[in-house]
Each structure stands twice: as structure tokens, then as C-alpha cells.
Amino acid sequence: MLTPLRLTLLLCLVQMLAMTGSLTFQALIPVFIVDWQLTNTQAAWIGGASYVGYALTAPVLVALTDRLDARRIVILACLLGGIGGLGFALFATGFWSAFFWRLLTGIAIAGSYMPGLKALTDRLPEAQISGRPQAFYSATFSLASATSLFVAGLLTAAIGWPAAFAATGISALLAAALMATLPARHPGQSHGSGSMATRIGAVLRDRPTMRYIAAYAAHSWEMFAFRTWIVAFLTFAALETGMAGGTVLVSAIATVLILAGLPAGLLGNELAARTDRRRGTAGLMLAAALMGVLVGLAAGLSFILIAALALVYGALLMADNSAILVGTIQSTPAERRGAAIATQTFFAAFMALISPLAVGAVLDGFGSGTTAWTMAFLVMALGPLVGGITLLWSKRT
């Protein structure tokens, strides 16, 4: 039997491999805008295709984990992720074909990320249900995303973008093989009871849980807009200030910005655990909103200044991630945890879809210059601002 430490490390490694394709297109938006003559809005739609797939399937897949062993769902999702990555590398030639293959990638992520969290939680002793393992797992999301950005930039510069997408497909297949080594969980251990609709209805009426779900939706608005557009923003800033280095330099900087979210997420959860979780998380969200505004106002200034501010922003916008996820699990009875995560995933996926589109529309509307990027970051900052206010507004019950 796996110890909690080995179990956590195994699930984190599976997530790392499964999500290498999560930001591959987003990392290469400047390349595809030129090669395929895309508008910012079209690029946002392709980047958002994975979020469409995520939003359409994640609630159902996560809710099923109250009745089925999440291990099976994760394995099938990783196999689909392999198809999505290899399919894009071989057959994507423009907007619609790219949209289709990214849609499959989104479905794969929907079946691997949150179900992976449920697989971890189901196999932990009850005393650790709301502890550090879930925080480590959710914080690994930043490491996986950073790896996705870096590998995409590196392989594209060395070989070409098809190699970058093919690598994500192979990685997802390896994740499926690794997940298959996890011992199956006996169906009799399932906590789920009642229909899916009944359990989700109970979640929607649970005010403490819904506070965290609303906060996570607001967090997702900011996080996915930032991760979709950060490479394009840094590329703009480098060209605007005459900074040399090209795709590899920009990808490396973007990787560091997102990688900063790993320790920040862990520290944020520790801070929330040692204080009032609701107020501590709200404070982190409001700090992220302020930093988002500062990054937007810095557009057009020194590239070094922009990179430094963006580094702090990249850390702050992930500092509340684990704190919110653990808060959701902690506030939900065991028999509804799958339904709660499914509900949270649905709202988060919806925000993940519309926020990159909103930023793309702002960039097109304001001409893709300095003013456009300032407005884009103000739009991003609306997420944590609303989330922080929501947490502070609600009275504890």
C-alpha cells in the first residue's frame, strides 16, 4: 500500500505529465498569429478551445468520482490527451482544425486534473483530507503549466511547433501508463449517495462551500487570462523596448513567472491555515488585483521593470489557489466532495473560457498597443477584486 507521501508524489507526477499540453498553444500565440494570420480574438478562441472542452465535460467527469474510482477516469483522459497532442501536431492547419484538437486536449485535462485530486483525497486517511497533500497537488499545477510553456518555446525554436505538440501527446500517454500503476480502489469505499443533481443541489445551497466556489471562479478568470496572454504580452514588451532574445527568452521568462506560483500556492495555503482561511484568502486576492493593475500601468516602460512586476504578479495570482481548493474540500461533507469539486470546476471552466476571450477582444478593440495591454490587465484584475470582496462580504455561518 502506498504511503501518503508516495501517493502524493505519484499523483503530482501524473499531473505533470498529463498537463504538458495545457499551455502549448498559448505559449505560441505570437507564432500562430503570424503563420496563420489570426486576429487576437481568433487566437483567443483557439486557446480557449481547451477551456470549452474542460467546461463541457469536467462537471460530469468530476461528479462521477463520487461513484467510480477516479483512477479509471484519469487513465482514459490521459489517453485522450495523447490523441489530442499528436493530432494537433499532424493535422492542425488553421483555425478550425486547431480548435478541434485543442478541444480534445481540454476534455483530457478535465478528466485528469480534478479527478486526480479526488483520486488522491479518496486514498488518504481522513485526518489528512484537508491537509498538505491536496495543497501540494494543486500547487503542482503551476509547475506543470510552467513546463508546458518552456517545452513549447524550446522545441518550437529548435525543431518547429509540430514537435512541441507531439511531445505533449507522448507525455500524456506516459501519464496514463503511470496512473495504471496506482492500485484500484474498491467501489464499496465510495462516499457518493443520491443522484448527481441532488448532490449538486445540496452544494449550491451550502453557503460556506459556495463562498469558496465563487472565489475560485473569480481566481480562474484572472489565472487563465494571464496564462493565455502572458507570452504575447512579454513578446510585445520585448519588441516595444528593443529587448533581444526571441522566442526562447520570452518563453523562459514566462516559465519563471508561472513557476513562481508553485511556492506561492503552498505558502498561501499555510497562511490561510494559520489564520482565518476566508479573510486570509481574501487578502491574497486583493493583493493580486493590485499587482495586476500595476503590471498594466507599466506596459510600455522598461522590460526589466515589467518582468519584475509580472514575476510578483505571477506569484500572487497563484497564492490563493491551494487555499481556496482546500477550503472547498474542508467545508464540504465527504459524501458531496465530488459534487462540490464538479460545481467548482464548472464555474471555473466557464470563467477560464470567457476571460481570455475578453482580453483578446480588448486587445483588438484598443489596437494591440500600450493602451490595449493596460486595459487588458485591468480586465484581468477584475477577477481577484470581485473574489476578494465576495469572501469579505459573506458572513460566516
Image (cartoon, grey):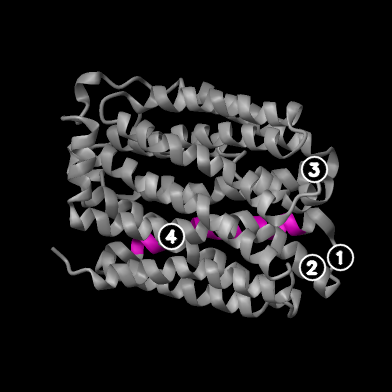
What is the residue that sits farthest to the front in this orientation? 365
- Alpha carbon distance from label 1 to label 2: 7 Å
The picture places residue 81, in percent across and down from the top left corner, at 57, 29
Which one is nearer the viewer's eye here, 289 or 327?
A: 289
Q: Quadrant of residue 50?
A: top right
- State which region is magenta: 250-270
3 or 1: tag closer to the N-terminus: 3
Judging by the rendered image, the residue that carries numbered circle 4 is 219
Q: Quadrant of residue 186?
A: top left
The three-letter code of the residue at mark 1 reads Ala
Neighbour class for label 4 at 10 Å: few (<14), some, many (≥20)? many
For the residues bearing labels 3 and 2, Cβ distance under 8 angstroms: no
Judging by the rendered image, the residue that carries numbered circle 3 is 156
The three-letter code of the residue at mark 4 reads His
The three-letter code of the residue at mark 2 reads Ala
Which one is nearer the viewer's eye here, 103 or 25?
A: 103
The picture places residue 122, in percent across and down from the top left corner, at 28, 33
The picture places residue 296, in percent across and down from the top left corner, at 62, 75
- Alpha carbon distance from label 4 to label 3: 30 Å
208 vs 195: above or below:
below
- Alpha carbon distance from label 4 to label 2: 27 Å
Neighbour class for label 1 at 10 Å: few (<14), some, many (≥20)? few
Q: Is residue 337 left or right of residue 56?
A: left
3 or 2: tag closer to the N-terminus: 3
Judging by the rendered image, the residue that carries numbered circle 1 is 244
- Look at the numbered disc 4 and give the secondary structure of its residue: helix
- Alpha carbon distance from label 4 to label 1: 33 Å
Neighbour class for label 2 at 10 Å: few (<14), some, many (≥20)? many
Judging by the rendered image, the residue that carries numbered circle 2 is 238
Q: Nearer the viewer, mark 4 or mark 3?
A: 4
The three-letter code of the residue at mark 3 reads Thr
Screen quadrant of the N terminus: top left
